[in-house]
Image (cartoon, helix red, strand yellow):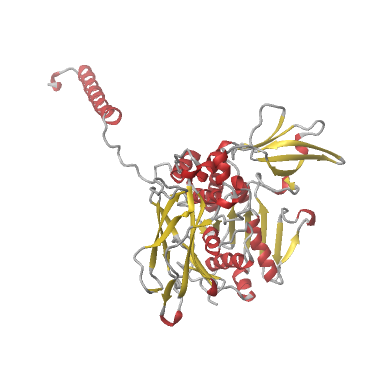
Amino acid sequence: MLQHCPTRKRVLLLILFFALSFITMFHKMSKVNFFLPSPQPRISNKTRSTEKTEGDILQALLKYVPQVNYKEFDQTSNAKKSRATLLHPKQNYTIGETIRIQVDICDHNGNLKTYGGDFILARIRSPEHKAAASGVVKDLNNGIYHIDFKLFWPGQVEVVVQLVHPSEAVAAIWRAKQMDYDKISYTGIFTNNSVQEKTECYSYLKSSQSVCLYVDEREKETYSCLKPLTLSCETLTFFQSRNSITSYLTKNEIKLLDRSNIAVTIPNDFPTISVFSINNELLLSSEKCYLGTLQPVPSGFFHSGHWYPSFCNCRSFQNDNDINSCLQGKDLYFRGDSTVRQWLEHLTSKLKNLKYLKTTEKFKSRAPMLAVDEQRNITIDWRKHGHPWITVHLNVIKEGNYVSREVDKIAGGENIIVVITVGQHFRPFPLELHIRRLLNIRKAIERLKARSPKTRVFIKLENIRELTSETLRFSNWHGYIQNLAQREVFHGLNVTFLDAWDMTVADNTNNVHPPQHVVHSQVALFLSYLCHNSSD
C-alpha cells in the first residue's frame, strides 16, 4: 500500500511506523525491567563494579557478632561447667587423621546454652616435643561447638580448649568498640623553638570547639586537636596516648571481663590421644611455597620449636648464608606496627653485614629504621603507620604516615617486596576506622600492581597478645574480627597472607611481641615464599 503514496507522505508514514514500533518495544522493556519480578540479565565480571565499601565489609562481618539474651549473670557461659568430648574415640590414631571434639557450653547453673557466639581458642600440644597446632572451631549456634584437629606428629597429644570470652562478654566488647573513639585519649604537643604547648587531640573531627584539623581528603582520614593558645596548628610535633576513664559496661559485663573469667580452660572428659606414624615421621608437605597459595586452617604446626606449614615445605633458614642468598639484591619495605619491626630486628641480629644506616636513638622504637648490606645490595626499610599509634612515650607525628601513602611512594619491581601489618593499634576503635584504612591500602596496592605487576606484596595478620592487657580495649577478640576484616578486604587481590594469628594461637604466645622462635618462624615462611626454588 505504501508504494501508491506520494514520496513525502511515504516518508512520513515510515517515520511514524518506526516511532510507534520503538515506543511499543520500550514499553515492553520497561515492564520487564522495572515492574515485573523477573530475573535481571547476567552482567559480565568485566563490567560489574567490584569496589568494596566500608558498609559491605562491615555487613559481611556482623554474622560473627553474637546476639545475646540474658538477664542474670548465672545465665552467662561458664567454662568450668562446660565439657569437651572426643567424638568417635579410638585407642590409637595415625598422623594425617582428623579428630573432632564437641564442646557443650553451659551456664553457671549447668544448663546448656541455647545460642552461640562464645570466643573459643583451641589447640593440641605435646610439651615434650615442643609441638602444637590450632584447631578449627565451628559454632553450631545452639551452645554446641565442633572443633577439628589434624594430627601432624606422633606421640601423646593433649587437647586444650579455652573459653576466652563468653558470648555475653563478646557482645559487650563489640558494643563498646562501636560506641566511640574516646577509649584512648591523646595529648598533642606543639613545639616551636623553646615554646611548648599541650592540648587534647581526637581520632575524629572534634567540631564543638576551636580545633586544628589534620585531614587527608583522598583517604578520608581525619584527626583533630584543640588549638593551642599561641602556636600554629602546623607546629604539632608529638602525640602521647593514655587509656580514657570511661564507663561502657554494666555490673555483669564488668564481672564477665574480670581476668578470672578470661581464657578459662574447658574440662575434657577424655585422656591424651596416642598418635603413631611410620618411623616417627611428621606430616610434612612437599609442595613449594608459592605466592598467593590458598592456606588451610590450621596453616601449620610447631615441632621442636620450628614451624611447619601444612600447605608447603618451609625452609628453616637457620643458616646465615641461606638468608643472605635469598635476600641478595632485594629491597624490602616493612610498613605497619612494631610486630613487623621485629622482623627487621631479627634479621639484623642474625646477619653481620646488615647494618642500621640511620636511627634516632631517643625515639628508636618508633622512628623509621633502615638497614643495609652494601656488599649484597640488601635494603630493609621499616616505617610505622600513621595515626592512631598507641604509646605512653613521645610519638613523633612526622615519622608516621598512612600506609597507603607510603605504598604510593614505592616504584615497584621484581626485587621489591612489601610487607604490611595494620591492626594492634586499631583495636580500641570502631571497626569502620580499621576497614577504611584497609580499603585505602587495597587501592594503593592495586595502583602499585598496575605500575609494577611483579612487585610482591604480603599481608601479615595480627597475632594474639597478653591476656593482662586492658580487655575492653585490647582483647584478642578485636584481633580476631580485624583479621576477618583483612581477609574480606584483600580477598581477590594478588597478595600473600602471613598467618601470624594461627602461629601464635598454636604456640599460645600471649605477647604482643612474640618470642624469637615465633618471629624466626614468621620470617622463615616469608623467605620461603621469596626463595622456594632452593633447599636447605
Q: Residue at x 55, y 59 (%)?
A: 500
Write down the quadrant of residue 47 in the picture: top left
Which residue lies most toward the bottom here?
A: 279
Side of 533 relative to 23 (left or right): right
Write down the quadrant of residue 527 in the picture: bottom right
Side of 163 relative to 5 (left or right): right
Point out the image quarter for the N terminus.
Answer: top left
Q: Residue at x 36, y 63 (%)?
A: 87
Q: 443 or 265, which is in the foreground?
A: 265
Residue 123 at x, y percent in the picture? 49, 63
Point out the image quarter for the C terminus.
Answer: bottom right
Figure check: 487 above or below 209: below
Count the marks: how many? 0
Which residue lies most toward the right here?
A: 194
Figure check: 30 above or below 434: above
Q: Residue at x 55, y 46 (%)?
A: 256
Can residue 455 be seen in this snapshot? no
Side of 338 relative to 156 (left or right): right
Q: 125 or 151, which is in the foreground?
A: 125
Residue 135 at x, y percent in the picture? 45, 61
Q: 272 or 226, which is in the foreground?
A: 272
Which residue lies most toward the front here?
A: 109
Residue 394 at x, y percent in the picture? 76, 48
Figure check: 107 above or below 101: above
Can residue 162 be seen in this snapshot? yes
Residue 89 at x, y percent in the picture? 36, 68
Q: Residue at x 67, y 57 (%)?
A: 382
